[in-house]
Image (tube, rainbow, N blue to C red):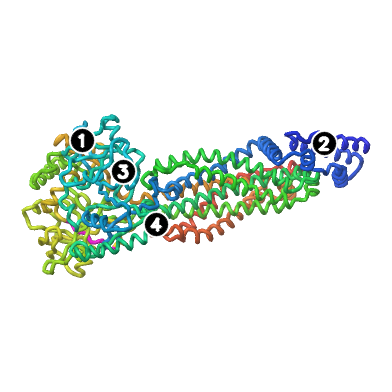
């Protein structure tokens, strides 16, 4: 028998030598070794050896085969490249033999990689990519710093002085958004426009698709009206005709000559500037206050720094200029400074904190995915321990075995990265479509080279991290013991590692769930804040009178608005109508400088007292349902022929008339200097948002009667006024009725920009809502992965302890005892993870402080509620393998090896 056995060993050695250089060497070698070791063990047992003696003898009989495959390759001159190819081929074959394991591992990693890639593509597009303009690092925004407004609008005369006297900028430009009533091209339509100075487009390096940009000659008094249009308007209204140049376009009843087309690729958002349908030179704006140094009129600027000039140097330079202007024009420029910020920083705004929170959250999801796959790999490596032991016993170094294992992991990572990239492309598109207004620079978010490199990097990194646990297990393995055990059991060290993985998953999932819970409670708290009015069934929209009214007298304009009020109020579904100029709740702001009657007029507007100014009509209080605290509100008798009156809010009264009755008090406003009597007091409206209003320095509010406004103000209103109505019934039907009634008044009169007040309030919370949705999605995914992980680990451990369960039940243990044993094992790990997660959340959730409102990062209700939820879900996940364990047949379990 021994002679026969020795002959077979010599035959094996001969066959091993002949196998060197073949592409399937690894797989064939392992199959040969298994077959012949089994044969040797069988022969030794037949010779009467004990099982331990048989294993030892079989292993000793293979001593002549201790030359490893690496030695054969070296002797035959095979290089590292061929070794790598063979490792990859063997790894692919090994993964292909376990399609279920491979699919689960790839899908788990793909979810984590895809989520990280999607969020990183947003961070990359919004925060990391440079702006799409030449030398964008030189671009800065310009604003006037004023009392209560660090980034206020710029008066046009001040801009001209800044432009002339500065030494820091190579170019400087301004812009002011506007809405035009476009007629003569089908139905009358309101188009978004922008008044700009001639330098704007050249400063940004934007070149027209057709035609030319503005020249300084276009921005002179008496110059012919010219306009640039967007590519979208060119295609929509002019059929993309190349003969567009020189064609007329009627805006607000005035004919403009089209001189160029701006490409659709132009995107720029800062202050109130947006890419628009129409651009015209700013001096073509018919506003009587444009050349008044005391009025900013919503104008904001942009500039390009000279090469080598820093932002700080530019600020110093502008401080010099504004000080000189304050000395020269103290009545208008006293207290006025210049505010300069990098353009990219201004565009990003307050999105950076919540993007960083989301990036951290999705990183936690990836960590859970890695831990899940590491658990799978560790359990799988335990089943392959005999294979690894044989290879080591034959002379292969542990490093060689680990390298092969890591090669398999890299293949998993590459497959997961490819699938994750597809998932990321879909998720990014869906996320931006869901809430496009939540992000600046949304049009620049996509899968560019940096995102692809990031995906490749995290794919390889996750594969390596996932393979660390089984690799370390191989380093600590004892081949002799593994051969004796036959690879059919898992050691206590492996059990501890798997338990640690479950703890990590639970801790990380809990942190994400707490973050999502805090954001959810924040939104609930915000929705419960009283805005000071009732937004339900309130609709706002813009109204542009027919072009013939653009140059009409103030009397005709007032008459036209009264006719609009009467016609719209008679529309089915409309309960009340009011004009709304000046400030709008949680919308645009407008300030009214004033001083008290009987006191000397202050030297400048900046020395005057300030209040937010709402210019409205008598039904406004009925529409908004703002509580009247004392006195009266406006009536139809408060018109242009009666003494001017005003209504103030509680904040105005408490600030300027503390402990007094303000009714009958008199003030003077800066627009006319005429006396205005206070006739009523109403509740405060949260102008600056549900969360920020109480933190603002300017909160006092004053209501002025629309028909009592000065003629110079009335003359500016026909081209774009706001209306607010309270309606009942179906909103779509009400809008149809309003548009039909408006067309009956004039086919050239336009209603546009309709929005409910509920959506206005909702828009103020868009960033928080976006963060809550994504955090909730990632937290749900993390909880699902964590529960899948604890289910998989519990199932595997139960399968490894089948014989133990059988012995317990054979010795008298009840099924409920086995059920409790398995459940307690899972719950114990979950409780440890929850404890660790609560400790980590106490630190990490503080990073979300700027996103929260009236919610503590350590809110006990959230901590306890989320912890209980996770424990219950984990308990459910453990229940399935626990029930399976409790139903084991003791006799069958005892026969299991």
CA distance separating discs 2 and 3: 73 Å
In the picture, the disc for residue 17 is 2
Quarter residue 276 falls in:
top left
Considering only order in the chain, which callout, 4 or 2, is on the residue closer to the N terminus?
2
Front residue of 188/222: it is 222
Considering only order in the chain, which callout, 2 or 1, is on the residue closer to the N terminus?
2
The reply to whether dot 4 and dot 1 touch (C-beta < 8 Å) is no
Residue that protrudes farthest toward the left in the picture: 641
Mark 2 element type: helix
Say which quadrant the C terminus sits in.
top right
For this view, does 372 lie left or right of residue 163? right
Q: For the magenta stretch, what is the residue range?
A: 697-703
Considering only order in the chain, which callout, 3 or 1, is on the residue closer to the N terminus?
1
> Which of label 4 and label 1 is nearer to you?
4
Considering only order in the chain, which callout, 3 or 4, is on the residue closer to the N terminus?
3
Q: Position of residue 680 (x, y in %)?
A: 15, 60
Is any atom of residue 886 visible in this view? no
CA distance separating discs 4 and 1: 43 Å
Q: Which residue is mark 3?
A: 275
CA distance separating discs 4 and 3: 29 Å
Considering only order in the chain, which callout, 1 or 4, is on the residue closer to the N terminus?
1
Q: Which residue is mark 1?
A: 249
Q: Position of residue 140 (x, y in %)?
A: 35, 54
Q: Which residue is mark 4?
A: 308
The reply to whether dot 2 and dot 4 touch (C-beta < 8 Å) is no
CA distance separating discs 1 and 3: 19 Å
Q: Position of residue 601 (x, y in %)?
A: 14, 66
> In percent of the image, x 87 and y 34: which residue is there?
11
Quarter residue 311 falls in:
bottom left
Front residue of 203/603: it is 203
């Amino acid at each position: 028998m021994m002679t026969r056995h020795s002959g077979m060993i010599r035959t094996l050695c001969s066959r091993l030598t002949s196998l060197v250089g073949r592409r399937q060497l690894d797989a064939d070698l392992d199959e040969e070794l298994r077959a012949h070791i089994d044969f040797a063990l069988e022969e030794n047992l037949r010779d009467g050896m004990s099982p331990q003696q048989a294993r030892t003898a079989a292993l000793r009989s293979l001593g002549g085969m201790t030359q490893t495959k690496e030695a054969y390759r070296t002797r035959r001159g095979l290089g590292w490249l061929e070794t790598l190819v063979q490792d990859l081929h063997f790894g692919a074959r090994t993964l292909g033999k376990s399609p279920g394991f491979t699919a689960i591992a790839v899908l788990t990693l793909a979810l984590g990689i895809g989520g990280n890639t999607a969020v990183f593509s947003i961070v990359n597009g919004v925060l990391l990519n440079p702006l799409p303009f030449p030398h964008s690092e030189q671009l800065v925004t310009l604003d006037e710093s004023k009392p209560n407004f660090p980034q206020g609008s710029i008066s046009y005369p001040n801009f001209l002085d800044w432009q002339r006297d500065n030494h820091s900028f190579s170019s400087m430009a301004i812009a002011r958004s506007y809405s035009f009533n476009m007629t003569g091209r089908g139905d009358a339509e309101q188009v978004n426009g922008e008044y700009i100075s001639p330098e704007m487009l050249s400063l940004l390096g934007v070149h027209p698709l057709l035609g030319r940009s503005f020249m300084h000659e276009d921005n002179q008094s008496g110059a012919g009206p010219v306009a640039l249009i967007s590519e979208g308007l060119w295609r929509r209204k002019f059929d993309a005709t190349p003969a567009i140049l020189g064609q007329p376009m009627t805006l607000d009843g005035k004919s403009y000559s089209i001189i160029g087309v701006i490409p659709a690729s132009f995107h720029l958002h800062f202050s109130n500037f947006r890419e628009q349908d129409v651009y015209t030179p700013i001096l073509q704006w018919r506003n009587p206050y444009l050349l008044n140094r005391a009025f900013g009129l919503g104008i904001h600027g942009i500039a390009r720094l000279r090469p080598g000039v820093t932002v700080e140097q530019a600020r110093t330079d502008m401080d010099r200029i504004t000080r000189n202007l304050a000395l020269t024009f103290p009545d208008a420029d006293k207290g006025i400074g210049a505010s300069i910020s990098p353009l990219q920083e201004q565009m990003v705004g307050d999105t950076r904190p919540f993007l960083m929170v989301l990036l951290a959250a999705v990183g936690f999801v990836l960590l859970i995915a890695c831990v899940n796959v590491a658990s799978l790999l560790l359990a799988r490596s335990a089943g392959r321990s005999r294979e690894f032991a044989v290879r080591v016993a034959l002379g292969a170094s542990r490093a060689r075995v680990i390298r092969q294992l890591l090669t398999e992991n890299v293949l998993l990572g590459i497959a997961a990265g490819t699938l994750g990239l597809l998932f990321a492309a879909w998720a990014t598109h869906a996320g931006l479509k869901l809430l496009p207004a939540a992000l600046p620079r949304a049009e620049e978010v996509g899968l560019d080279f940096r995102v692809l490199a990031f995906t490749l990097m995290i794919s390889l990194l996750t594969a390596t991290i996932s393979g660390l646990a089984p690799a370390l297990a191989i380093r600590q393995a004892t081949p002799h013991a593994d051969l004796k055990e036959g690879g059919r059991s898992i050691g206590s060290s492996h059990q501890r590692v798997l338990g640690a993985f479950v703890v990590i998953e639970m801790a990380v999932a809990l942190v994400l769930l707490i973050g999502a819970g805090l954001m959810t409670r924040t939104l609930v708290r915000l929705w419960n804040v009283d805005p000071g009015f009732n937004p339900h069934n309130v609709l706002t929209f813009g109204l542009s009178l027919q072009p013939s009214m653009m140059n009409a007298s103030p009397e005709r304009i007032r008459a036209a608005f009264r006719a609009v009020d009467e016609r719209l109020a008679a529309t089915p579904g409309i309960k009340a109508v009011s004009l709304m100029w000046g400030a709008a709740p949680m919308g645009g702001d407008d300030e009214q400088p004033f001083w008290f009657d009987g006191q000397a007029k202050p030297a400048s507007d900046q020395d005057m007292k300030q209040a937010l100014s709402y210019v409205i009509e008598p039904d406004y209080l009925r529409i908004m349902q703002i509580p009247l605290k004392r006195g009266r509100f406006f009536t139809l008798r408060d018109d242009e022929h009666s003494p001017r009156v005003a209504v103030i809010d509680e904040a105005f009264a408490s600030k300027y008339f503390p402990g007094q009755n303000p009714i009958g008090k008199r003030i003077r406003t800066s627009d006319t200097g005429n006396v205005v009597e206070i006739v009523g007091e109403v509740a405060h409206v949260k102008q600056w948002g549900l969360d920020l209003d109480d933190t603002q320095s300017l909160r006092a509010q004053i209501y002025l009667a629309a028909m009592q406004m000065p003629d110079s103000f009335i003359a500016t209103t026909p081209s774009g006024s706001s209306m607010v109505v309270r309606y009942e019934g179906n909103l779509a039907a009400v809008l149809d009725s309003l548009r039909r009634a408006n067309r009956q008044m004039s086919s050239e009169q336009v209603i546009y920009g309709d929005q409910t007040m509920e959506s206005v309030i909702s828009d103020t919370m868009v960033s928080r809502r976006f963060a809550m949705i994504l955090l909730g999605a990632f937290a749900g995914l993390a909880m699902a992965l964590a529960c899948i992980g604890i289910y998989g680990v519990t199932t595997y451990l139960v399968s490894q302890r089948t014989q133990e369960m059988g012995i317990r039940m054979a010795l008298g243990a009840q099924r409920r005892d086995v059920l409790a044993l398995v459940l307690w094992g899972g719950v114990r790990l979950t409780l440890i993870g929850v404890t660790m997660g609560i400790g980590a959340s106490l630190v990490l959730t503080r990073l979300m402080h700027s996103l929260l409102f009236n919610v503590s990062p350590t809110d006990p209700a959230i901590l306890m509620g989320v912890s209980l939820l996770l424990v219950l879900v984990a308990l459910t996940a453990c229940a399935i393998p626990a029930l399976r364990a409790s139903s084991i047949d003791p006799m069958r379990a005892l026969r299991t090896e």
